[in-house]
Image (cartoon, rainbow, N blue to C red):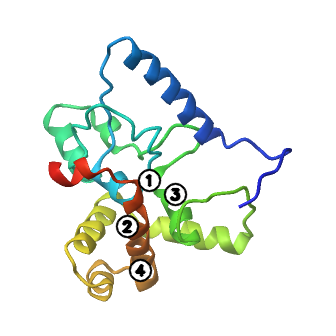
């Protein structure tokens, strides 16, 4: 990892940091912060511990993204809200599955500014085309349940490389988890 004085500010991380400062201000005034992270994000490490992972209570942390969508349907959320792609909203075109595809390609979070070749972008978009919310959650659940990557790849129709990279992502994300979560589930 390198630091460049003339480097581009990571807009997503900067916005998340600003949100954290705002939430801290409310917390200091006696409010409680309710988080909206879910199990899919938690297990993959697809959150910032002192950003969107920061909350007094996380009422849906035990639900996979597809289960959150099912819950939203049951409580009457408009279909156009449920069906839209998950996104941090930090930049135009942000989409969780595409961002996660970059992570899967790179073997983890992108930690520094870099450029991608057209071939690399084609591979990343190829990963994205193979994923959807339900499939991702099913693969994560199977990995967490101890099913082999080979069996999951065969059952899900995914390349073994994607399943193994997701398995590695789950393993490397464990450093972010707080012990409380293990008791909640």
The circle drawn on residue 46 is: 1
Residue at mark 1 to residue at mark 4: CA–CA distance: 17 Å
Closer to the eye: label 3 or 2: 2
What residue sits right under mark 3 in the picture? 98
Query: Do the residues bearing badges 3 and 2 touch, measured as CB atoms within 8 Å?
Result: no
What residue sits right under mark 4 in the picture? 164
Label 4 residue SS = helix
Q: Is residue 150 above or below residue 5?
A: below
> Considering only order in the chain, which callout, 2 or 4, is on the residue closer to the N terminus?
4
- Whether residue 95 is visible, yes or no, is yes
Label 1 residue SS = loop
> Considering only order in the chain, which callout, 3 or 1, is on the residue closer to the N terminus?
1
Q: Is residue 51 above or below residue 121?
A: above
> Considering only order in the chain, which callout, 2 or 3, is on the residue closer to the N terminus?
3
What residue sits right under mark 2 in the picture? 170
> Considering only order in the chain, which callout, 4 or 1, is on the residue closer to the N terminus?
1
Residue at mark 3 to residue at mark 2: CA–CA distance: 17 Å
Q: Residue at x 67, y 72 (%)?
A: 120
């Amino acid at each position: 990892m390198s630091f460049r004085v003339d480097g581009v500010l990571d807009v997503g991380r900067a916005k998340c940091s600003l949100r954290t400062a705002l939430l801290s201000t409310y917390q200091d005034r006696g409010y409680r912060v309710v988080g909206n992270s879910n199990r899919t994000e938690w297990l993959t490490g697809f959150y910032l511990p002192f950003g969107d992972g920061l909350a007094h209570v996380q009422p849906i942390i035990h639900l996979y993204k597809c289960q959150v969508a099912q819950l939203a349907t049951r409580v009457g959320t408009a279909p156009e809200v449920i069906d839209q792609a998950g996104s941090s909203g930090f930049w135009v075109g942000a989409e969780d599955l595409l961002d996660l595809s970059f992570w899967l390609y790179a073997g983890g979070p992108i930690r520094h500014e870099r450029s991608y070749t057209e071939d690399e972008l084609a591979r990343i978009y190829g990963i994205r085309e193979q994923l959807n919310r339900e499939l991702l959650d099913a693969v994560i659940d199977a990995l967490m349940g101890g099913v082999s990557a080979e069996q999951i790849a065969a059952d899900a129709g995914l390349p073994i490389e994607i399943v193994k990279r997701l398995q590695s992502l789950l393993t490397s994300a464990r450093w972010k988890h707080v012990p409380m979560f293990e008791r909640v589930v």
